[in-house]
Image (tube, grey):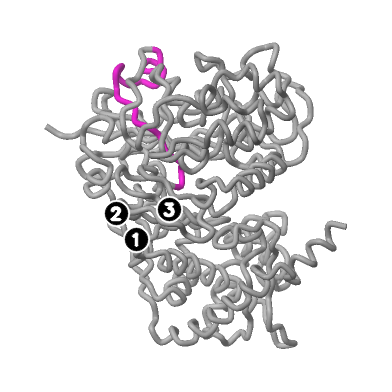
Amino acid sequence: MTRGHALGLDFGTESVRAVVLDLESGALTATAVAPFPHGVIDRSLPEGGPPLPHDWALQDSDDWLTSMEHATREAMAAAGVQAASVKGIGIDFTASTILPTTGNGTPLHGIDALRAQPHAWPKLWKHHAAQAQADRINAVAARRGEKWLPRYGGKTSSEWLMAKALEMLDEAPEIYAAAECIVEAGDWVAWRLTGSLARNACAAGYKALWHKRDGYPSSDFLRALDPGLENLYASKVSGQVLAPGQVVGHLAGEWAQRLGLAEGTPVGSPMIDAHAAALGGGVSGPGTLFIVMGTSSCHLLLAEREVLVEGMSGVVEDGIVAGLFGYEAGQAGVGDIFAWFVRSGVPSADEVVPFELGDSGKRAGLIHDLMSQRAAALAPGESGLLALDWWNGSRTPLVDADLSGAILGYTLETTPEAIYRALIEATAFGTRMIIDVFKEAGLAVDRVRVSGGLSRNELLTGIYADVTGLPFEICATDQASGVGAAMLGAVAGGAFDRVDEAVGSLAQPPARIVPPDTSHGATYDALYGQYARLVDLFGRDPSSPLKQLRALRAQ
């Protein structure tokens, strides 16, 4: 008797992907993508609703359900498997994407009287309008010496649940009062499918400040922050916290019919999309740093103990694999730095673009290819340049969004490809510094595995391997998050007892391994030493020229 299949539902920023995974071979049987009809709502509410302020980003929860239905049915049809073959359902979702609901899970924006109120709608992860609230949270927590704050690098984010909830209380107290529940989108989808509400340990820990032993921040802290927020965790964010893959409930009859699946199919506790990618990429134990490389980079590491790491974005027990501590760090700008350069510092268009300039995507791709080819011809150190990768601020280790980038060493002979290579090297140095702060805290980093679009760039992965001195393993699948979600479904459905067993059995070996070129080690060690000096001078020094420039720009 075969194990059958698992369904992974991978909710991204613009769409949902359904993945059907074979539980014998680990092969992707089929995938399907369905975009969200309203996409990201960042200008005005639908149906002629009011305009939205700057830095707002909302979604429509109806889109999640409609698109999930379309993607699931399409994937199941493409897979050609029977409903009974799907043993479990797993979910990953962007985070912190939250929505306020009634006690039975009805989204407040679905209530006619509240539909014109922006705070009644789901706030997407990249809703950044709660920065003032995040600043207040950080100041009060630091003043009180809250012991949970160092677990998040000393600062919480405007993207996280507490800041968004406080923003709701500040700007729309009637919506906050009406919200009997404030719930992560992944947990809400599982609630819709099963009729059962639970909080997944991944989002609860990394985005809502939950700790397995200490729980959430205290009511005393919330009262000091704002008396109206005192009941946030006791009431609006209450509920059982489940490790990834634990059973939330079973597929209700209505949703079995809508999705074309069997009623009673187990649904596993969800997790954040990037963290699910670590599982889908084959990481389930200590020693391997997993990096999702895109416009920014997310660095994830598993360990058997909890320690404090400078600038980490969080450490959560059971956050990725039950029984282990999952550490998150990151770089706020990576691929978007390279994209900036392609927009702003490229050779003449007629040199690289033999077609109409209006095709900007192809033009950018050609320029990236050309810059990679030319930059590959340069030896380490040959450019004479050194950059700080802070175009979008520093996440780890400095946790400072007010920092900006820098390039040193320009001469009249500096070429575009030299700049391009220096930018890649800067992001590699940033990753090496993350590895160093993990090691300085006593955590093992023996190898690196990467996923995401940038992992296909051979120049970039080669430079990263050379800079860190570690082999870079390239994930075999482009659907690591969806595969990881399906693994959660496999565990919930009983095909495997534990998540690490599912990963060990189902994950594909790396597509390739990029070893470090030891002949480049001494040069990159020297360059990294100078990079570290610049981090101290421009990042840690309160009188940093970058901070002074930022202050002048704000005047």
- Report whether residue 4 is seen: yes
Q: Nearer the viewer, residue 211 or 273?
A: 211
Image quadrant in which the C terminus is located: bottom right
- Report whether residue 32 is seen: no
Give the percent coordinates (x, y) of residue 120.
Answer: 66, 23
Determine crowd level at label 3: few under 14, some 14-19, many 20+ residues with C-alpha closer than 10 A.
Answer: many
Q: Nearer the viewer, residue 373 or 436?
A: 436
Which residue is under mark 2?
Answer: 285
* Image quadrant assignment for residue 359: bottom right
Give the percent coordinates (x, y) of residue 530.
Answer: 58, 81
Which residue is under mark 3?
Answer: 327
Residue type at mark 2? Gly
Disc 2/disc 1 C-alpha distance (Å): 7 Å
Q: Is label 2 in a helix, a strand or a loop?
A: loop
Q: Kindly identify the residue that appears in the image at 74 percent across and 68 percent down.
A: 546
The magenta span reads 254-274
First in sequence: mark 3 vs mark 2: 2
